[in-house]
Image (tube, rainbow, N blue to C red):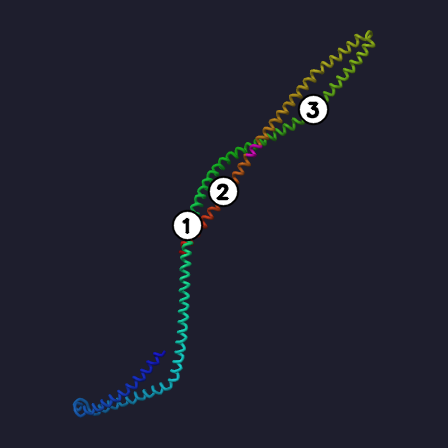
Amino acid sequence: MMRALEDYKELLKSTGSDSCSLDDSVARSLNFEESRTQTEKMMHKSRLEVENEVRSLKAQLVQQKAEVEKLKVEYGWEEPARKKMCVLHHREVDSLQEHIQKEKEKNEDLKQQLIKALEKDAKNRSQYTQLKQQYLSEKAEWEDKLRLSQKDRDALEERVQENSQAMLLLQAEVKRLKVEEQLLRSSLQMAEERDALLSEQLQEKQSAVSKAQACIVQLQEANLRIRGLERQFQEQEEVLRMAKILKADLEQLPRLRKENAQIREENKLHRQTRLNVRLMEEELHTAQQKVAQHEALQLQLAQQAVEIEELKRCLASWEALAQFEQTTL
């Protein structure tokens, strides 16, 4: 703004000097015209044309002087505004200097912050290098664990496949054993019922035999007493009676022995049936143990699968972190 005011002053000065020089030049030109009118203009131009030119030049001179006066008046009117503008300009300059000083201080703070940021960036780069090395080490370790886990999983899957086939066979065998167990239990129940019935019959027969034997003893004693009292009179009759009684007893004795042998055979069959049932129960218990082992193996395989998935997620997170660090660098 100050430069513009100075340019304006120089313009006014140049305008004033131009007006003075114009007067001088006009005066010189008039003298020159007068001399030319006496010598050379007599041959080329008429006096009238020269006067017209002079009048035109004078009119232009008057007009230029009026413009110069007008500019002088305007310059006088604008002098307070110019001073006010100078004051405002100085204030603006001071404000700009203060702003520049603040900007310098701010720039210095920014430089310090930049230095700290560069130091922090160097520290972060060092930490990143350490983390990257740690990541690569842990990644290799996890990859080794993953390979071992996959190897174990493949082995477990093969074992599960084998155990699945064995389990199918065991399940079929268990079903067969269960059916056979039901049949044996039914047979055992029937045998126990029959044994109970035979035991009752045997007890009844033994009771009858005991009663018969007791009766025989009583009869013998009675016969002895009778023979003692009536030995002479009833000897033949008693002998005949004893013969009949003994004959009847001898006829019943083979039948009782046969029934007793039959009962013993049935008891032997019952004992054999109980032994078979016990063996079946042991086989069933063994099959149940194998099924429990297979279920434990399946549970272990499921745990291995969960651990493998966890390792995969951990590896994926490490890879994502490494990719993020690479993109940020």
Residue 250 falls left or right of residue 53? right
Q: Amino acid at mark 2?
A: Gln
- Disc 2 crowd rating (10 Å Cα; few below 14, some 14-19, many 20+) is some
Mark 3 vs 1, N-terminal side: 1
Dot 3 alpha-carbon crowd within 10 angstroms: few under 14, some 14 to 19, many 20 or more: some
The residues bearing labels 3 and 1 have C-alpha atoms spaced at a distance of 88 Å
148 above or below 225? below
Residue at which label 3 appears: 199
Determine the secondary structure under disc 1. Answer: helix
Q: In which image quadrant can residue 63 be found?
A: bottom left
Q: Which three-letter amino acid code belongs to the residue tagged 1?
A: Gln
- Horizontal side of 211 relative to 9 (left or right) equals right
Label 2: which residue?
Answer: 304
Image height of 184 relative to 121, above or below = above
Give the Cα distance between marks 1 and 2: 28 Å
Mark 1 or 2: in front is 1
Q: Are marks 2 and 3 in contact (CB under 8 Å)?
A: no
- Locate residue 59, reporting x and y percent: 28, 90
Q: Name the mark nearer the viewer: 3 or 1.
A: 1
Alpha carbon separation for disc pair 2 and 3? 61 Å
The magenta stretch spans residue 288: yes
Q: Who comes first in sequence, dot 1 or dot 2?
A: 1
* Above or below, 223 relative to 97: above
Magenta includes 312? no
Extent of the magenta region: 285-289
Depth check: 147 or 110 in front?
110
Residue drawn where x is 80% and y is 11% of the image = 224
Residue visible at 36% across and 79% down in the picture = 2
Residue 215: give x, y in percent of width and height: 77, 17
Residue hosting label 1 = 133
Front one among 166 and 318: 318
The N terminus appears in which quarter of the rendering? bottom left
